[in-house]
Amino acid sequence: MSHDDSEIMSTGDRLIYMANQIAKNLAARGDEEAIGITADHIKAYWDPLMRSRVADLLAQRSDEFSPIAAEAVRRIHS
């Protein structure tokens, strides 16, 4: 993503992008480990508002999340 692209992305788009990027970077570890590490990362480094917002986004726009990112968000909010 170029600098210009990031300026036009909404906050929701950015959160989905970030969750998917974390998941993508961990995918080589296998789904189960990647899901766990992605969930741990989001819990550790995202503030509560971001975590809440990404859960809402998953409910509204689940097709935009990778399977790993989607399951990680579900685990955080289950």
Image: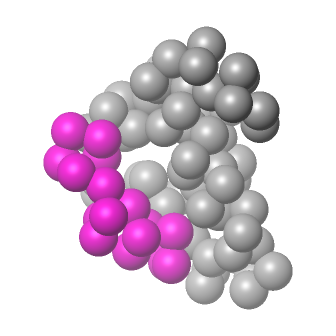
Which quadrant of the rendered structure holds the N terminus? Answer: top right
Which quadrant of the rendered structure holds the C terminus? Answer: bottom left
Looking at the picture, how far across and down is residue 18, in whole percent?
56, 47
Looking at the picture, how far across and down is residue 40, in whole percent?
39, 74
Question: Vertically, is 28 above or below 17?
Answer: below
Residue drawn at (74%, 62%), measured in percent from left and top? 24
Count of numbered circles on the image? 0
Image colouring:
one colour
Residue drawn at (47%, 25%), measured in percent from left and top? 12
- As drawn, the residue found furthest toward the front would be 3
Looking at the picture, how far across and down is residue 37, in whole percent?
51, 78
Question: Vertically, is 77 above or below 43?
Answer: above
Q: Is residue 15 left or right of residue 49?
A: right
- As drawn, the residue found furthest toward the top would be 8
Residue drawn at (49%, 78%), measured in percent from left and top? 36
Q: Is residue 32 left or right of residue 36?
A: right
Residue drawn at (29%, 70%), measured in percent from left and top? 44
Q: Is residue 14 left or right of residue 34?
A: left
Looking at the picture, how far across and down is residue 57, in whole percent?
45, 28
In front: 21, or 4? Answer: 4
- Residue 18: in sight, yes or no? yes
- Residue 61: in sight, yes or no? no
Residue stretch rendered in magenta on the structure: 36-51
Question: Vertically, is 30 above or below 49?
Answer: below
